[in-house]
Amino acid sequence: MSSTVLKCGKIFDGESQTLLSDQEILVSDGTIVEVAATVNVPSEATVIDLGDRTVSPGFIDAHVHLTMDAANLQMQTLGSTATKALTGLSIARGYLNHGFTTVRDLGAMDPETPTLDLRNAIASGQVTGPRIIAAAHIISPTGGHGDIGGFYPTRWDIPVSALADDRAEVRAAVRREHAIGSDWVKTVNAGGYFSPGDDPAVCTWFDDEMDALCQTARQLGMPVAVHTGAADACKQAIRSGARSLEHAYLIDEEGVRMAAEAGVFIVPTMQMTQEDLQQLNDGTLADQAVWKFSRDAEQILDSQRMVAAGDADIVFGTDCGMFPFDHGIKEFSALVNAGLTPLRALTAATSTAARMLEREDLGRIRPGAAADIVAMPGNPLSDISATEHVDFVMSRGEIIRHSDTGRD
């Protein structure tokens, strides 16, 4: 039985309002066994001194696309499933080095299941990477945000998303996602900025279709994540029983209040807006996004501040894949700049994300939790940018990165 003891100067345990000082963490076989001022150190244990670091639960990014490349989306989507899986593995390993020990992948844009294959390979120990929780495909109406057929000549039929156009087709699409082993159902009920031919200000499911999707998922025990934009689309998703609103670009105060009352989580992907603004200013934003994003940018920023000021649970998610993964860590600062406290931003990527995922073993440093642990110089509760300098990463009890030992 392998054991590790971490001697910690300060700990953010994922839930407390302040940092704990001078604690030790005993890890054995991938699980946290004890957290105390002094733990019982097994004779064979490896002892690591993190006394000059702030230790935290591993970060959870609840909205990524490991197999997508927005800068080259049309051609990348045509790539083979194997190419996407191998590229996704390389990206996942790099993201783990930034401290992300768990990611929720919300759509591979591939007819097969590269993200489920990656999930299974990592979980079985065949390869190293962050824990993956996945929705294999995006269930979309024809012409909706998940339908990228507009990128290609009409004679090309590339079923990279799950298209459905009435209640029966919606139910069948959800059942297929369940059958292939998706953890979540991902759907879209409003247009997007990078997809052609749709509009984020327009709701694209009828109420009975959205109801049918959520009812079927609930029957099968699957939570639903909804890419959404327009205020009425946000409210439709809440009424139908979604567990998380992704982006919620144009949500209003009523929608934020409804989410809080219904216990629906909001994943606002705020850094992506900053990336899009930069591209818009540089003249490099994708052509199909320019008119939509130019129209909505100020309202998106207003909605993000509204979300930050509200009582709904906010979960850290980036939409990386739509922009480079090495920028994902900036989401912490984007959340704080929108009005969250550093504490709330940290819990968004740890215990709040774990609650959304219904994983009591994640996002916390306490006995019985998974040994997903990161450390960084500085104090993220006083300066959230400390999160950008993680230099120790433990995933499932295995040391992935430790600058003091040259694993960097």
Image (tube, helix red, strand yellow):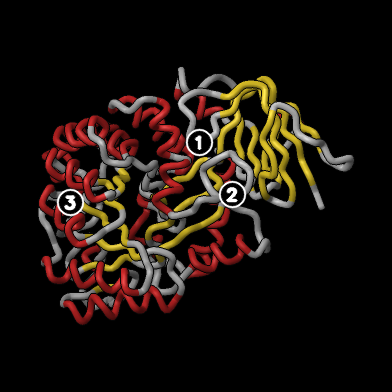
Q: Quadrant of residue 146?
A: bottom left
Q: What residue type is labelled 1?
A: Gly
Where is 362 relative to 118, above or below?
above
In which quadrant will I find the C terminus? top right
CA distance separating discs 3 and 1: 28 Å
Label 1: few (<14), some or many (≥20) within 10 Å? many
Q: Where is residue 155 in the image (x, y as percent from the top left)?
A: 23, 78
Q: Tags 1 and 2 in contact by the CB under 8 Å rule?
A: no
- Residues 40 and 120: in front is 40
Q: What element carries label 2?
A: helix
- Residue 93 - label: 2
Residue topped by disc 3: 234
Q: Quadrant of residue 57?
A: top right
Task: State the residue at coordinates (47%, 59%).
Answer: 133
Front disc: 3 or 1: 1
Q: What element carries label 1?
A: loop
Residue topped by disc 1: 14
Q: Position of residue 280 (x, y in %)?
A: 23, 36
CA distance separating discs 1 and 2: 23 Å
Task: State the residue at coordinates (50%, 36%).
Answer: 14
